[in-house]
Each structure stands twice: as structure tokens, then as C-alpha cells.
């Protein structure tokens, strides 16, 4: 494992680079390699990853490791180097527009420190511009969503302004989804009730809001919603579109990371009489939660 972490990849074929990164990622998922060590490896690897598909995959792994597997103290320690690699060394310095956009999107999904949140605001205000990249309305809503997740005091006003600037059907959906990211337990309870009880709420709006509402950083706020989300699962699977249950479970189960949440899901699996296909979907979501619990139990330092 240590030799793999230290293997120089300069000049290596993209397939070899991707295979090494994937092997190390599987070690993280098995709790054999700490997620912070993987992040350190990824930071050395990013500048040498020339294939856009491999780069997108590596950035997605970075986001999962940072947001789902680390404790806050670990995030505080790793955030400055990671954020600098994604924004200054990545989005602002990459040699193609496609790479700049990949780095920029990873930056706004991961932004953690006060400096990174300030840079998000500067990007929204145009004080920082990424060459060749135009921030569409959807991009702006996603950046504001991240500010809301992190409790930035200016984020609600930014959301209101962007919602006023984009009154299209898509804009209204984006605004609804971004608003679900606010760290407000009563708002989250209200939205979860609306998901289940408001017949006039478009399904596409619910799907867009599921992940922001269940941001991994807010697992403690959304844990009280888990029991009802599981109990209503069979009815939702019958009444909604075919992939709705997958998104529902990925959000409400996948957004959790505690042993208590895992025990609740396992108890539901034992006691509920689920249709076989639906049971498999829940088992898949429970596996992701189980891995998070196992990884954090071994490697999280706080």
C-alpha cells in the first residue's frame, strides 16, 4: 500500500493512473487506507492526470472522501491545500476549459474554510473569473447552495437575488433545491413533510432537493427524518417514477454516517416486508452507510 501511495505517475499511461487511483480508492472503501492519506495522494496526482474522464473520477472520489469520511478536525487540516489545488492550481491555472470547469465544480462542492467560502462569494460577484468559463444560472445556484450548507450569513440574500434573476421554471426548481441546504432543522422537517404530503409539489423539484437537504455535513440535523423516510419507502416506490426510490435512499440513507443511523436502517431491513427489488435498493444504500461508519470508526480523529 505504501509503495502504491509513493509510486510516481509522471508520464504514466492514463489507464495506469486510473487503475492505481481506483485500487487505492477501494482500499479506502474497505477501511484499509485512511481517507486523508488518499486525499494527499490525490493532491499529488491531480496535476499529472491529463485525461478528463480520469480527472472527473478522481475529483469525485476526493469529494466523497472529504465530505463523507472525515471528521471536522481532519477537514480543517486538509482543506487549505485541497482548496488551493482545486481553485488556484486547478480552475485558474488549467490549460483547457473542460479541465477548468471540472476543477471549479469540485471546488464549490468541497469548499470548507472561511477563505474558500469568501472565494466562492468572489466568484459569484465576478471578482474572480475562471478563463473561458461562464457561470450559468445552475452553476450559481450550486455555489450558493454550498454557502448555505456551510452557514454563510450572506447566503440567504444571495439565494433570493439569484431566484429573482432567474424566474424560469428551471430557476424556480434550482432555487427550491438550493434552499433545502440551509442548516435549519425546522426547515428540513417542513420540506420532508412537503415531499410526502404536498400533491402539488413537482417530483422533479423533490428529486433536485433531496441531496441538498441531506448534505453529509448536516447528518445530525437530518437523522430525525430517517425513520419516516424509510417507513414511507414502499408507498413512494409504487407511486413515483422508477428511479425515484434510488434517489430517495441515496439521500436519506447515504447522507448519514453514524452507527445509530446504520442500526436504524438494519432494524428496518429485518422488520419490513419489502418487495425484493426494493429491498436490494435499500441494501445498496445501507452498504454505503455501513462503509462510512466503518471508515469513520477507524480513521476519523474526532
Image: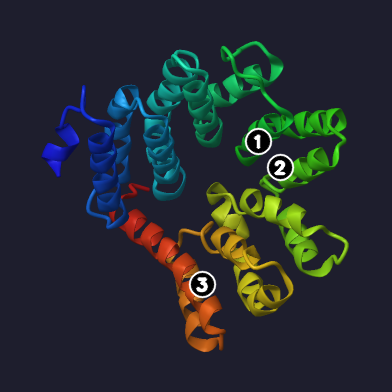
* Distance (Cα) linking label 1 and label 2: 7 Å
> Residue 284, percent across and down?
45, 68
> On the image, numbered disc 3 is attached to which residue?
282
Judged from this view, the residue extending furthest toward the left is: 3
Front one among 32 and 134:
134
* Position of residue 248 measured from the top left corner of the image (x, y, whole percent): 62, 63
Query: Is residue 186 at all visible to an observer of this figure?
Result: no
Look at the numbered discs 1 and 2 and tell me whether their residues touch, using CB distance below 8 Å: yes
Q: Mark 2 or 3 closer to N-term? A: 2
Q: Is residue 110 left or right of residue 146?
A: left
Tag 1 secondary structure: helix
| Residue where numbered disc 2 is placed | 178
Mark 3 neighbour class, 10 Å CA radius: few under 14, some 14 to 19, many 20 or more: many
Q: Taking the image as drawn, is residue 85 in sight?
A: yes
Q: Residue at x 42, y 30 (%)?
A: 52
Q: Secondary structure at mark 3?
A: helix
The quadrant of the picture occupied by the N terminus is top left
Residue bearing the label numbered 1: 142
Mark earlier in primary sequence (1, 3): 1
Amino acid at each position: 500500500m505504501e509503495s502504491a501511495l509513493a509510486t510516481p505517475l509522471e508520464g504514466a499511461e492514463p489507464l495506469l493512473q486510473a487503475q492505481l487511483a481506483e485500487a487505492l480508492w477501494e482500499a479506502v472503501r474497505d477501511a484499509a487506507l485512511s481517507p486523508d492519506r488518499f486525499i494527499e495522494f490525490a493532491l499529488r496526482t491531480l496535476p499529472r492526470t491529463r485525461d478528463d474522464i480520469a480527472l472527473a473520477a478522481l475529483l469525485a472520489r476526493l469529494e466523497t472522501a472529504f465530505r463523507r469520511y472525515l471528521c471536522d478536525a481532519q477537514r480543517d487540516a486538509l482543506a487549505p491545500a485541497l482548496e488551493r489545488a482545486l481553485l488556484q492550481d486547478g480552475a485558474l491555472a488549467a490549460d483547457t476549459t473542460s479541465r477548468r470547469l471540472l476543477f471549479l465544480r469540485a471546488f464549490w462542492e468541497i469548499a470548507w474554510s472561511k477563505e474558500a467560502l469568501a472565494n466562492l462569494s468572489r466568484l459569484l460577484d465576478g471578482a474572480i473569473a475562471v478563463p473561458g468559463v461562464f457561470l450559468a444560472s445552475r452553476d450559481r445556484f450550486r455555489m450558493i447552495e454550498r454557502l448555505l450548507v456551510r452557514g454563510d450569513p450572506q447566503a440567504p440574500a444571495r439565494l433570493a437575488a439569484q431566484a429573482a434573476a432567474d424566474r424560469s421554471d428551471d430557476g424556480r426548481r434550482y432555487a427550491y433545491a438550493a434552499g433545502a441546504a440551509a442548516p435549519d432543522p425546522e426547515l428540513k422537517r417542513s420540506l420532508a413533510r412537503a415531499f410526502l404530503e404536498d400533491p402539488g409539489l413537482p417530483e422533479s423539484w423533490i428529486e433536485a432537493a433531496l441531496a441538498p437537504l441531506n448534505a453529509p455535513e448536516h447528518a445530525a440535523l437530518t437523522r430525525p427524518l430517517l425513520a419516516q423516510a424509510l417507513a414511507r419507502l414502499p408507498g413512494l416506490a409504487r407511486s413515483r417514477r422508477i428511479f425515484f426510490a434510488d434517489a430517495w435512499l441515496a439521500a436519506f440513507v447515504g447522507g448519514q454516517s453514524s452507527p445509530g443511523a446504520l442500526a436504524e436502517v438494519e432494524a428496518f431491513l429485518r422488520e419490513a416486508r419489502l418487495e425484493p427489488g426494493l429491498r436490494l435498493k435499500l441494501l445498496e444504500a445501507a452498504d454505503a452507510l455501513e462503509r462510512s461508519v466503518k471508515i469513520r470508526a477507524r480513521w476519523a480523529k474526532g
